[in-house]
């Protein structure tokens, strides 16, 4: 199959422009043909990255933006009672958005307190929650992009308040049959999808006999690059309120650095099941960008888990490029924090992290990781146990 090196845009990702390519690949695999050849290394200029401190952006529409982070419950959809529990969770998220905009139903959705928020950030799974679902179950609860009904409901709030809303979810795309993608979604003031950013990779080998089954970029790297190009492996949404990247990858400082080098000005870090505060503070300081570390609150009714659900009192934070905490939750309950970011001044004065590339590149080129990419091109595990077996096989274990 001929190589394609195209920048991923909304059409190519979300309207099925690449469906024919994927269908051909699937047909080839079904017929016993070889998997795709490794994607070619990026050509010069193919990845949009800072050049001597300058990076791509679009004009800002305002000098300051108000940002809110919602620390909400991790409340899972029950696949045995999907319709009711999904509606319950979606209703809760919508109410929290209203509260973040200081416009609750009790006030007739009128803002009687505080200021309009330009960017609302939520954690990795605010609507669906998290369970060790099978692939069949995940496909039942995954959101359809770009315009599934759940996304449309949240999009209506983004349009009502003329704001951006960032949240994570399990998603499915028709170009990737049977895959359930761990996705970070950004909706715009028109209520439509601005960007859908795949999780870059999952942590492997740290969950006992189990492993995650949501698809990430690293799991299907060669095919992903053939479809979308290298620039989309670590995406940045260039919006009129700033360059925004979202990630649910935890404990990956080099990945955060690369997002900063690509021009991210606001990094939304949304790892469900663990506090993001310390990592967000360190990331902001090291990479000279704003971070929003947003986690879940204590979650008393999450199926199969204790009330804490990984929550720590480190909490949810908004941090400036010096590592100074602008806002922080002081408890582990549901809460909303706010901060005002001088985005125009930041863009004028920002000095992008200086990376000694010549010094580091020989190490990165010689390094050989335990886990190679493309595992989900070889086999798509149906359960966490099957995924764990695949991890052990990749580690050379029985």
Image (spheres, rainbow, N blue to C red):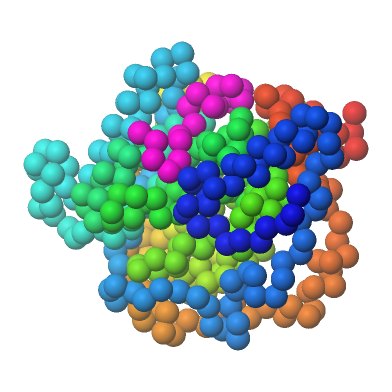
Question: Which residue is painted at 41% across and 84% down in the image?
Answer: 348
Vertical side of 111 occupied by 105: above or below: above
Picture quadrant where residue 152 is located: top left
Q: Which residue shows up at 10% across the image and 52% down it?
A: 112
Q: Position of residue 115 (x, y in %)?
A: 19, 60
Membership of 300 in magenta stretch:
no
From the viewer's perspective, tell me whether residue 363 is left or right of residue 260: right
Q: In which quarter of the image is residue 135?
A: top right
| In the displayed structure image, the side of residue 87 where residue 7 appears, left or right | right
From this viewpoint, is residue 15 visible? Answer: yes
Instruction: Classify residue 88 as left or right of residue 32.
Output: left
Q: How many marks?
A: 0
Question: Against 245, is 349 above or below?
Answer: below
Residue depicted at x 78% and y 34%: 29
Residue extent of the magenta highlight: 132-149
User: x, y (%) of residue 208?
Assistant: 74, 31
Q: Which of these two is toward me, 45 or 161? A: 45
In this view, the residue in front, 168 or 34, is 34
Does 146 appear in magenta? yes
């Amino acid at each position: 199959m001929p190589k394609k090196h195209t920048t991923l845009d909304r059409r190519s990702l979300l309207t099925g422009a690449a469906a024919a390519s994927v269908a051909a690949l699937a047909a080839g695999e079904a017929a016993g043909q070889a998997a795709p050849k490794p994607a070619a290394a990026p050509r010069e200029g193919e990845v949009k990255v800072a050049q001597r401190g300058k990076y791509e952006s679009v004009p800002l529409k305002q000098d300051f933006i108000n940002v809110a982070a919602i620390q909400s419950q991790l409340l899972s959809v029950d696949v045995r009672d999907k319709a009711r529990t999904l509606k319950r969770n979606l209703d809760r998220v919508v109410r929290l958005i209203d509260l973040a905009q200081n416009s609750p139903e009790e006030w007739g959705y009128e803002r009687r307190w505080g200021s309009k928020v330009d960017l609302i950030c939520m954690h990795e799974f605010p609507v669906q929650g998290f369970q060790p679902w099978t692939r069949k179950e995940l496909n039942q609860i995954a959101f359809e992009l770009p315009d599934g009904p759940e996304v449309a409901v949240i999009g209506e709030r983004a349009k009502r308040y003329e704001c951006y809303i960032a949240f994570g979810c399990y998603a499915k795309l028709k170009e990737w049959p049977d895959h359930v993608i761990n996705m970070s979604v950004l909706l715009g003031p028109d209520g439509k999808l601005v960007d859908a950013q795949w999780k870059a990779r999952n942590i492997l080998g740290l969950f006992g006999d189990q492993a995650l089954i949501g698809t990430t970029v690293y799991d299907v790297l060669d095919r992903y690059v053939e479809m979308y190009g290298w620039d989309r492996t670590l995406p940045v949404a260039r919006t009129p309120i700033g360059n925004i990247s979202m990630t649910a990858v935890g404990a990956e400082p080099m990945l955060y650095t690369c997002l900063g080098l690509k021009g991210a000005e606001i990094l939304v870090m949304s790892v469900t099941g663990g506090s993001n505060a310390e990592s967000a503070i360190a990331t902001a300081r090291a990479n000279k960008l704003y971070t929003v570390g947003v986690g879940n609150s204590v979650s008393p009714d999450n199926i199969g888990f204790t009330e804490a659900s990984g929550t720590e009192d480190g909490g949810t934070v908004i941090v400036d490029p010096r590592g100074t905490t602008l806002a922080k939750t002081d408890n582990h309950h549901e809460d909303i924090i706010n901060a005002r970011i001088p985005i125009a001044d930041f863009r004028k004065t920002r000095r992008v992290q200086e990376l000694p590339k010549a010094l580091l590149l020989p190490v990165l080129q010689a390094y050989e990781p335990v886990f190679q990419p493309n595992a989900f091109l070889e086999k798509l595990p149906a359960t966490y146990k099957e995924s764990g077996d695949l991890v052990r096989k990749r580690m050379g274990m029985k």
